[in-house]
Amino acid sequence: MRLAVRVTRTVVAALALPVALLALWWILTADSESYYLPPLSEILADLDDVWLRSDRLSADVLPSLLRLSGGFLLAVLLGVSLGVAIGSSRRLRAFCEPVLEFLRAIPPPVLVPVLMLFAGIGDTMKVLVILSGCLWPILLNTVEGVRAVDEVLVETARCYGVRGPARLWHLVVRSASPQIVTGMRQGLSIGIILMVISEMFAASNGLGFSIIQFQRTFAVTEMWTGILLLGLLGFLLATLMRLFERRVLNWYFGLRQAQRGGSR
């Protein structure tokens, strides 16, 4: 019973503001005669026709999600691997820090023309653009998480002879996992933005391509359906990331709850 109440409260808290904003949008645009801001009722009606009753889900949405998944997973692999290596060594961290700060300061959209020269205009370029943006929050959060590993735990593992892969996985990665997941959540938000931006340059499919095509042909209502669909996908991906976070960091949230209970 308590679990059902807790889940209900969580769902209501998550949906209350989006539903309120949609209701406000509906009310404010109900009598709109502006060509550039059609009523929400028309946008929702066209959403079904443009995306659900056509092949656009497989032709545009699926390729976008595949590119986002490829770039994001590569960023997680590289970011965690390099972050653990850099965070575990003071000398390596001091050596790499100036270069990391320089590269992090470069906005990923600026790299789109450069990557087009080397990787062409296909999916490889788009995946690399997403990778270039997702990598830095994951990498830097991993470095900070590894640096913050409790020295008492490090000494305890050394005393008990925990070394090699066991030490790396059970001590370093596990201790840094809250920071790593935080970087993943930040990287996913950046990846969605870069997915759209990369598809607006010399693309033949994808959500970003569809939205810019609707805009260029003055199909304004259809353009708004793409923007709304993009927002819904972002919300869904953020929800899945939160469920992943709860699953992976269940021990961490349990520890925090126990500490709060003990402090009372």
Image (cartoon, helix red, strand yellow):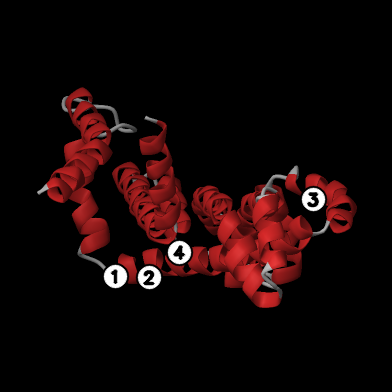
Looking at the picture, tell me which residue is in the foreground, 215 or 100.
100
Element assignment for label 3: helix
Which mark is nearer the camera, 3 or 4?
3
Question: The residue under label 4 is which amino acid type?
Answer: Ser
Mark 1 in CB contact with mark 2 (< 8 angstroms): yes
Q: Please say if 147 is above or below 122.
A: above
Q: Which of the two labelled residues, at mark 3 and mark 1, occupies the earlier sequence position?
A: 1
Q: Earlier in the sequence, mark 4 or mark 2?
A: 2
55 shown above or below 13: below
Residue displayed at 24% across by 42% down: 10
The residue pinned by badge 3 equals 100
Q: CA distance from mark 4 to mark 2?
A: 9 Å
Amino acid type at circle 1 is Asp
Amino acid found under the numbered disc labelled 3: Leu
Label ID, residue 64 = 4
Q: Residues within 10 Å of mark 4 (few under 14, many from 20)?
A: many
Which percent across, then down, holds residue 57? 32, 66
